[in-house]
Image (cartoon, rainbow, N blue to C red):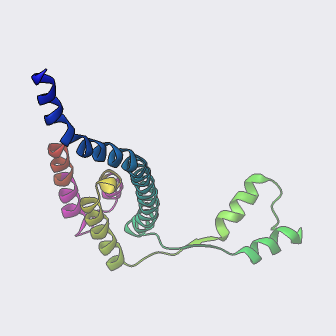
Amino acid sequence: MAGLSDLQGWFVPWIPAIATIVVAYLAARPLLKEAGLKREAEKRLAESAQVESDARLLATFVELMGKAHARGATTLAESATEAIISSGGPLAPKDLKELNDLVGAAVAVHPVGAAEVEAAIAAVAELGIRHPLLLEPALAGLSQIATWNKTSKALPSALEMLKAGKGALKEQL
């Protein structure tokens, strides 16, 4: 029986240490679970914030693309349109086509200056390079503008920069 007493002599001093480890584990389990849930909630919040940020960035980008396309704000002369329609006079539209023509004539698109167009083109290209989300839309938009805008000094280099950025992005993937 000397073997059993040796085993007890070796094992008994470790019982408090083993009990401490078990109690610590049981106490820490809920805290670890709570920390995991908190991490998941923070991750969802960060993803939601990223989606909102992307949406604002895209809205601003689309507005900037309009300037690169030489288009400013659009206004409708509502009071004049309402007066013509309600007058019932000879200018009042008699069918849907005439109404659409009237609204089309009452809408004013304000042009932007050449310097603003050039700056917008350069800004679109820069945003396309900095934000992979905007690379394809920037390339598509500026490529379309290049079909009619033959005088822009910024457009050729902007397109080159975007095409190079697209190639670099493909290499990274």
Q: Is residue 147 visible?
A: no
Q: In the displayed structure, would residue 17 be above or below residue 120? A: above
Q: Residue 168 at what x, y percent from top left?
A: 15, 50
Q: Is residue 86 magenta?
A: no
Q: Residue 91 at what x, y percent from top left?
A: 80, 68
Quarter of the image containing the N terminus?
top left
Question: Which quarter of the figure has residue 2?
Answer: top left
* Count of numbered labels shown in the rendering: 0
Q: In the displayed structure, would residue 67 be above or below residue 32? A: below
Is 95 or 156 nearer to us in this picture? Answer: 156
Question: Which quarter of the figure has residue 160?
Answer: bottom left
Name the residue located 81 percent from the left edge and 53 percent from the top edge: 95
Is 20 or 41 nearer to us in this picture? Answer: 20
Q: In the displayed structure, would residue 124 be above or below residue 36? A: below
Left or right, residue 22 beside residue 165: right
The magenta region covers 140-163
Q: Residue 21 at what x, y percent from top left?
A: 28, 45
Left or right, residue 14 beside residue 121: left
Q: Is residue 157 magenta?
A: yes
Q: Residue 173 at what x, y percent from top left?
A: 19, 42
Identity of the residue furthest to the top in this view: 1
Q: Is residue 2 visible?
A: yes
Name the residue located 30 percent from the left edge and 73 percent from the top edge: 118
Dominant secondary-structure state across the stretch colored magenta: helix
Name the residue located 69 percent from the left edge and 75 percent from the top edge: 77
Name the residue located 21 percent from the left edge and 38 percent from the top edge: 12
Is 37 or 76 nearer to us in this picture? Answer: 37
Question: Which quarter of the figure has residue 151?
Answer: bottom left
